[in-house]
Image (cartoon, rainbow, N blue to C red):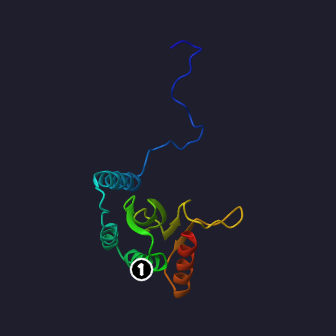
Amino acid sequence: MNDTQKSAKSKTGGSKSYEGFTEEERDAMKERAKELKAEGRRTAEKADGESEVLAKIAELPEPDRAMAERIHAIVTASAPELSPKTWYGMPAYAKDGKIICFFQSAAKFKSRYATLGFNDAANLDEGAMWPTSFALMELTSADEARIGALVKKAVQ
C-alpha cells in the first residue's frame, strides 16, 4: 500500500470499540430467521400464529409472563382483526402481514422494564411527534384501558 492509499480500517476516535451484537441481540436475530424460514414453508393455509405466541409467552419468566398474557388478552379483544405471530421471538400482532404492535419482555434483553411497542404501520400519528413504545413495570386497570384504546387506534 502506498502513502496515498488509506487503510480500510477506520478509527472511531473514542475509547470504546465496537464489540458486535450482544448475545441477546444474536438470539433475537436467530429467532427471526427461524420465523422467516417457517413463513417461507407455509402453504396457502395460514399457520396457527396464536399457538406460537402462547408458547412464547409460556416460556417467559414471571412477572413478564403474566404481563404478556394480559396484553395478549387485551390486544385480541380490542382488535380481533390482528393476527398473533412471533416477531424476533416476541409476541406480536399483525394486520395484512405487517406488525402493528409487539411485547418485549424485560428478561429477554436484561432490561428493568418490559416494552409494548408499535411499528410504523400502526395509526398512532398525533401531529409531528408521538410515542411508539411504552415501558411497562406492571399493569393497572387504567393501563389496560389505555393499551386497549391504543390498539384500537393503531388498527383504524
Identified at 50% across, 77% down, the residue is 137
List x then y, in percent, for residue 126: 68, 67
Q: How many marks?
A: 1
Using the image as rendered, state which of residue 1 and residue 116 is in the foreground: 116
Using the image as rendered, state which of residue 119 and residue 110 is in the foreground: 119
Using the image as rendered, state which of residue 117 and residue 76 is in the foreground: 76
Is 87 rendered above or below residue 57? above
Q: Say whether residue 113 is visible.
A: no
Quarter residue 2 falls in = top right
List x then y, in percent, for residue 1: 50, 14
Residue found at the very far front of the displayed protein: 44
Q: Secondary structure at mark 1?
A: helix
Identified at 32% across, 63% down, the residue is 46
Residue found at the very far top of the displayed protein: 2
Quadrant the C terminus occupies = bottom right
> Mark 1 = which residue?
73
The crowding category of the residue bearing disc 1, from other C-alpha atoms within 10 Å (few below 14, some 14 to 19, many at least 20), is: few
Q: Say whether residue 22 is visible.
A: yes
Identified at 34% across, 73% down, the residue is 61
Is 126 rendered above or below residue 8? below
Q: Is residue 99 left or right of residue 29?
A: right
List x then y, in percent, for residue 64: 40, 74
List x then y, in percent, for residue 82: 44, 70
Is 41 rendered above or below residue 119? above
Q: Amino acid at mark 1?
A: Ala
Is 39 rendered above or below residue 57? above
Residue found at the very far right of the displayed protein: 127
